[in-house]
Amino acid sequence: MTATQPTSHPSTPGLTPAAGQDGGEDSIDRLIREESERFLARQPRSAELIERSRRHLAGGATSNWQIADPQAVWMSHGAGSRIFDVDGTEYSDFHGGYGVSLAGHAHPAIVRAVTERVGRGTHFAQPTEDSIVVAEELARRWGLPQWRFGNSGTESTMDAVHLMRVATGRDRLLKVEGCYHGHHDSVQVSVAPEEGEMGPADAPTSAPAGSGVPQAMVDLVTIVPFNDLAAVDRALAAHPGSVAGMILEPLMMNAGVIHPQPGYLAGLKELLHAHGALLTFDEVKTGLTVGPGGVTRAQGVTPDIVCIAKAIGGGVSTAAIGGTEELMALIADGTYEQVGTFNGNPLAMAATRAMLTEVMTDAAYAHIERLASAMRAGIEEIIERHDLPWHVVTAGAKGCIAFRSEAIRNYRDFLDVDERLGQAHWLVQHNGGVFLPPWGKIEQWLISVQHNDEDVERFVTNVDRLARAVRAA
């Protein structure tokens, strides 16, 4: 998910939507307006619940990420690859709960595991055998021997930051500009900085990501661009002996999908270790969705620490942090107190065990890859046929349309993309029976193990309708 989202217009902070040449409504603005009107006409029950909820739910939602333009969509239930809103509309779900629903909805293996566990007790604040099986499977997939559990991506990245600081005795972090790693103070820096506060491209300024972040915490974070080893080298040289480590998404999300350039991840590990600093991969969004061992396995670069959440729980809230024997020994001996009442919760561990051992099999990944290839080919054919300056970026079950012709290498490249096209795409898909995350160009689609050819065809058909509307302008 993307942090610091506005509550009125789903835009990247600092990026003002373009309008017509005369400052009035142009064809894309008109498309957004017309599709928004259709959207609202189909959502009367959601509108009623929003009004009712505002009495006791702050902002009329359970998370600021749910407050979207033109309004939040309230859900009823899901089954397989489909979800149903409170107005009775069925959608092919390519939102996937920001990457959580890799198993789809009500997957039989998850339902069975959770149902059996509920009848035997859901919380003891003591470990159950499922947690051993999960740790063994994560170690096999990610190549890191020791694991601990938490309940959210924010918790796992928080533990990783604390562990890097404890292990090195240093306080400073390196962080990539435009990356989101949860909402704890240490990483709420330059998540989606405004253009006026970003500083020079080769030495970005550290900017608080929102209110409530102490300046003292911001000052401990040095910002570097994604895919820029030279910038990391300069940052390490500028702060000799004070950098605890670097945290990054090895495949950058929250800016569409941005792949690491060849040699970048391996180079980071080498640079950081040469300065006595550590490397953490935030695979909260990419773990399991990109492949059976995330980006770590796909790229063949094993960090010192990896953070996983979202998809691993099969829809139940859980998270994990994995690390080397040396680092995790600091947890084992109490040097770092990694704690949490719900860590390794029996219900979460039962669902995660089923997800890892029954759902995300080689056959499941082959199925996803076939659908992803068909979807990409279908969209690329539309882009070529309509001669549009767009391209498709995919990574396993994840993907997006980048609404520009050139490759996007980092956050600043991403800012050049007209966000109105992302908003128009979301609305066209929604009104065409496909549910996507409501932040346009920022987020990605997710293909679950329960999606089928009909879902893909519906998605591609909607892209064609968007392309025709844009090209007709």
Image: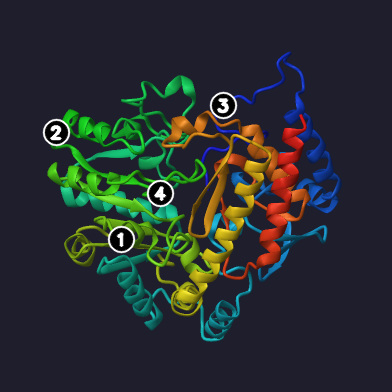
CB under 8 Å between callouts 3 and 1? Answer: no
Query: Residue 53: in sight, yes or no?
Result: no
Which one is in front in this view, the residue at disc 2 or the one at disc 1?
A: 2
- In the displayed structure, 233 sits above or below 341; it is above
Q: Earlier in the sequence, mark 3 or mark 1?
A: 3
Which of these two is toward me, 294 or 284? 294
CB under 8 Å between callouts 1 and 4? Answer: no
Q: Earlier in the sequence, mark 2 or mark 1?
A: 2
Q: Quadrant of the C terminus?
A: top right
Q: Which residue is mark 2?
A: 240
Q: Which residue is mark 1?
A: 338
Which one is in front in this view, the residue at disc 4 or the one at disc 2?
A: 4
How packed is label 4: few (under 14 Cα within 10 Å), some, or many (20 or more)?
many
Percent of width and height locating residue 310:
49, 60
Is residue 352 shown left or right of residue 451? left
Quarter assignment of residue 338: bottom left
Which one is in front in this view, the residue at disc 1 or the one at disc 4?
A: 4
Alpha-carbon span between mark 4 and mark 3: 23 Å
Quarter assignment of residue 284: bottom left
- In the displayed structure, 63 sits above or below 197; it is below
Alpha-carbon span between mark 1 and mark 4: 27 Å
Q: Earlier in the sequence, mark 4 or mark 3?
A: 3
How packed is label 3: few (under 14 Cα within 10 Å), some, or many (20 or more)?
some
Q: Which residue is mark 4?
A: 251
- Secondary structure, mark 4, is loop
Alpha-carbon span between mark 4 and mark 2: 27 Å
Query: Residue 422: in sight, yes or no?
Result: yes
Alpha-carbon span between mark 3 and mark 1: 39 Å
